[in-house]
Amino acid sequence: MLLPPHQEVCNPGFCDCPFPNSIEVTNHKGHIPDLVSCRCGEDEPGNVSPWRWHSTDESDALVTDRDIIFHPTYSQGTAIVRGDRALKPGMVHFWEMRVITTLAGTDVMFGIGTESVNLGQFKFHFVSALGTNAQSWGFSYSGRIQHCGEQLPYGQKFSQGCLIGVCLDRTRGHLEFYLNRRSLGVAYTNVPTDPDIRIYPMVCSTAAKSVIRLINCTSQQVTLQLRSFQALSKQPLKLAELRQMPGLRGILQSYWFLAPPIRYSRNSRENELDLGDEAVLSSSKLRRGRKQKYRESDDAAVDEDDLYANAHKITLRSSDSGDEEHPASVHEMCDEYFHYLL
Ligand SMILES: [Zn+2]
């Protein structure tokens, strides 16, 4: 179906639960989060809730443990809210937020920032606050990412009912976003790994009565197990084989966030692309186009890898990490990770 040019493609929600429309939200006299009964995907196993939202007078937002109501009366600018605890160095952190209200206005962003971010800096300015300088990194509801004031295309536009996941690897300095439980690929590889630099989860919004809920968060030590599963999470067929092994189930569960169970709304199932979302697929097509010069015959194999590879490979510009070629089998994969021990 062709959309009229003025209508931007927006990702459908994670599930089919009803969410309040803007008029209901505006007219509601009580606590806005109470309008939503959806609990889909909450409390995944392996969560230890290492942090919650931090309430401060610097930000025009009403904060409870899990919910943030930005600009509860009206909006005069941008509010930034952060987690109450820094994300520990040497660990992999994942957290997931549900978008409770329709997103609109200058920007609503999800990401991270250092302790140097001044939460009240844009109180009277409507801006895309995360990523305005080197101290923060943001993923906007427009689908773009921003750091050091530079915005780049990354994913699709998203709004109410969507789940936004953030994965920060503090040992490698990698930052990756998920939309409705699908990875959009590594967005940045320059997050400081220095243990002395404190980094916090952050969200910012310019929209009056916009509500975000933290639904899952977990922090895991970086171990050989985690690294192995990280590599496997890019190989869905092999992962499915491993899920059949009874002894591995518990381990796989504690790393659920690396290859999370996916639930789809009826809407999105109609357009199901099976392996990746359209944002990833479109970039995959570009990359496949390049590869086809050399590998005309086996693009099926290229496909599987590409769908799970970084949509934009921003890292490749500055880094020579060998991530691009994926090992072909579980055996090779294990070799790759076990040879460090030998
Ligand atoms: Zn739901």
Image: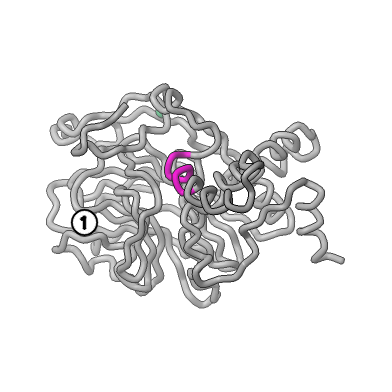
In the picture, measured across the screen, residue 147 lies left or right of residue 218, that is left
Residue at x-position 29% and y-position 70%: 118
- The residue depicted at 58 percent of the width and 67 percent of the height is 172
Vertical arrangement, residue 58 with respect to residue 211, above or below: below
In this rendering, position of residue 197 left or right of residue 60 = right
Whether residue 71 appears in this view of the structure is: no
Magenta-drawn segment: 277-283
> Is residue 181 covered in magenta?
no
What's the residue at 32%, 30% (across, down)?
Answer: 36
Disc 1 secondary structure class: loop
Question: How many neighbours does mark 1 have within 10 angstroms: few (below 14), some (14-19), or many (20 or more)?
Answer: many
Answer left or right for 259 relative to 12. right
Where is mark 1, residue-wise?
60
Amino acid type, mark 1: Asp
What is the quadrant of residue 149 in the picture? bottom left
| Above/below status of 103 relative to 140 | above
